[in-house]
Image: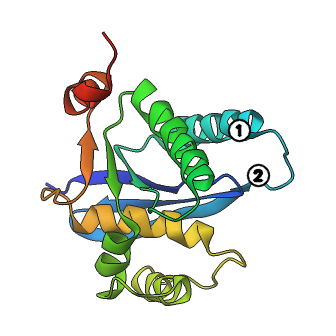
Amino acid sequence: MKTEKIILGVDPGTSIMGFGIIKVVGKKMEFVQMNELILKKYDNHYIKLKLIFERTIELIDTYHPDEIALEAPFFGKNVQSMLKLGRAQGVAMAAALSRDIPVTEYAPLKIKMAITGSGKASKEQVALMLKSLLNLKTLPKNLDATDGLAAAVCHHYNSGKVIGGKNYTGWASFVKQNEKRVKK
């Protein structure tokens, strides 16, 4: 009996949110979709967060993913950028958890390593490897969509062995793993 699983990968950003969806039948990956939500044209950060939440819910309701993989924000020098990226990721995570879909976070280095074998790979190298792995005809102009797709593929490669990623199966799981962050 073949098992089938749909994985939604999201690269949350406040300028562009990239996402990709794969279907896994047995151990074989099939490309379903990838795209991006362009947020640059909106000035209001809260509108951007609302749109990220709504688009994530729309993807969940359309494709019914079994699991969601998120690219965790990397630690840069700009604290404001980190805060905004963390909020974008949190909103995407909340959308998934509101539909009781397990979420796993992966560091950008881990995603690059899973796709290309090198944690120092460029966005272009990751995109070209995905093109080869999933027999894609073309690549998108912006590579944020391939970053989301890469998160999904990384999750497939790491299924059953979550190391270095945080895994939440629902709100209770999130709270249990983040007890210090919960105000009582």
The residue under the point 28% across, 53% down is: 4
User: Split into 4 quadrants, where in the image is the C terminus?
Assistant: top left
Label 1: few (<14), some or many (≥20) within 10 Å? some
**Which kind of residue does numbered mark 2 sit on?**
Leu
Instruction: Report whether 140 appears left or right of 149.
Output: right
Residue behind mark 1: 51
- Helix, strand or loop for disc 1: helix
Q: Position of residue 123 (x, y in %)?
A: 53, 82
Q: Quadrant of residue 154?
A: bottom left
Badge 1 amino acid: Leu
What's the coloring here? rainbow
Q: Residue at x 46, y 83 (%)?
A: 126
Q: Is residue 180 above or below residue 49?
A: above
Task: Please give left or right for residue 172 compared with residue 105 in the image.
Answer: left
- Residue 167 on image: x %, y %: 25, 44
Q: Earlier in the sequence, mark 1 or mark 2?
A: 2
Asked which secondary structure carries label 2, the reply is loop
- Tally the numbered discs: 2
Judged left or right of residue 141, residue 115 is left
Residue at x-position 44% and y-position 70%: 150
Real-space CA distance between mark 1 and mark 2, rounded to the nearest whole angstrom: 8 Å
- Residue on which the image places disc 2: 39
| Position of residue 141 measured from the top left corner of the image (x, y, whole percent) | 72, 79
Q: Which mark is residue 175?
A: none
Residue located 51% across and 89% down the image: 128
Q: Check the image and report above or below for 22 versus 178.
A: below
Question: Could you say which quadrant of the image residue 145 lies in?
Answer: bottom right
Local packing at callout 2 (Cα closer than 10 Å; few below 14, some 14-19, many 20+) is some
Q: Position of residue 11 (x, y in %)?
A: 52, 58
Vertical relation: 170 (above or below) 91: above
